[in-house]
Image (spheres, rainbow, N blue to C red):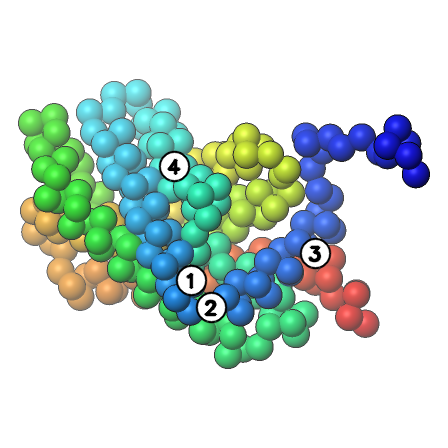
Amino acid sequence: MTAQEKPQYNPFDAYSPAEIAARAENVGVAKARMPLVQLITLGVLAGAYIAFGGALFTLVMTGNELGFGPGRLLGGLAFSLGLILVVIGGAELFTGNSLIVLAWAERLVTSGELVRNWFWVYLANFCGALGTVALMYWSATLELGGGQVAATAVAIAEAKVSLGFVEALTRGILCNVLVCLAVWLCLGARTVVSKIMAIVFPISAFVALGFEHSVANMYLIPIGWLAGAETVTVAGFLNNLLPVTLGNIIGGGFFVAAVYWLIYRRSDSN
């Protein structure tokens, strides 16, 4: 075939759903077998990146007079910064890594490799988020607007620790359905702009609807506590993080990864 006969590449032509499933499977294998130092370092970055999204969300929600719905939508757009940095910049995010379940279901990844990835990435995300909490606190960013940002951080943290187990679990499930769908759509995109657009709408939706993201809460609850949230305790923090984390695993691992495996990849192994 000559150069003139080669098919023209269209950067705006997305991969098909079946192609996305195959790409997600290959990515899952690579993530599950990533060297530990690289995995942890990228996990710390992801925790920090999501925390940046949480910090911008907190600022945008301060003094927001657009009305309940439009105001929360704007907050969701701001929070999208976090996943944009993770996907475009490159980092390992626990919630997005629920998609490794697709490769696990296809028996390309062992249960031990899956648990190894989730354990170290979750821990590294926690470290990255808490490190950002400390830096944001020392930067006195909470004092912006005459202390209004601190008041917003307090309100956010107190609302999160007040959730019951079932409510937090359900919100965690719904959250990671949207987060993993955002990552899934990114695997179908060919350009940076397309990937950003694929991220913005699902992430804005989960934030505006009040769903719960475990890594985001690793930043939002501690920063609220440092800002003076009186109802936030270590026990309250853990009581939020446990059901939210479990919900995130169910939402991304079962309702996205396992479902798409059943549709597009299971027939390949039979």
**What residue does disc 1 label?**
38
Residue found 23% across the figure and 48% down from its top = 132
Q: Nearer the viewer, mark 2 or mark 4?
A: 2
Real-space Cα distance between discs 4 and 1?
23 Å
Decide: marks 1, 2 in contact (CB < 8 A)? yes
Q: Earlier in the sequence, mark 4 or mark 3?
A: 3
SS class, disc 1: helix
The percent position of residue 39, horizontal first and vertical second, equals: 42, 63
SS class, disc 3: helix
> Residue most toward the top?
66
Q: Earlier in the sequence, mark 1 or mark 3?
A: 3
**What residue does disc 3 label?**
22
**What residue does disc 2 label?**
35
Q: Amino acid at mark 2?
A: Pro
Q: Nearer the viewer, residue 245 or 40?
A: 40
Visible residue check, residue 76:
no
Q: Nearer the viewer, residue 207 or 77?
A: 77
Question: In the rendered image of this protein, does residue 232 appear above or below residue 185?
Answer: below
SS class, disc 2: loop
Question: In the rendered image of this protein, does residue 91 appear above or below residue 82?
Answer: below
Real-space Cα distance between discs 2 and 4?
27 Å
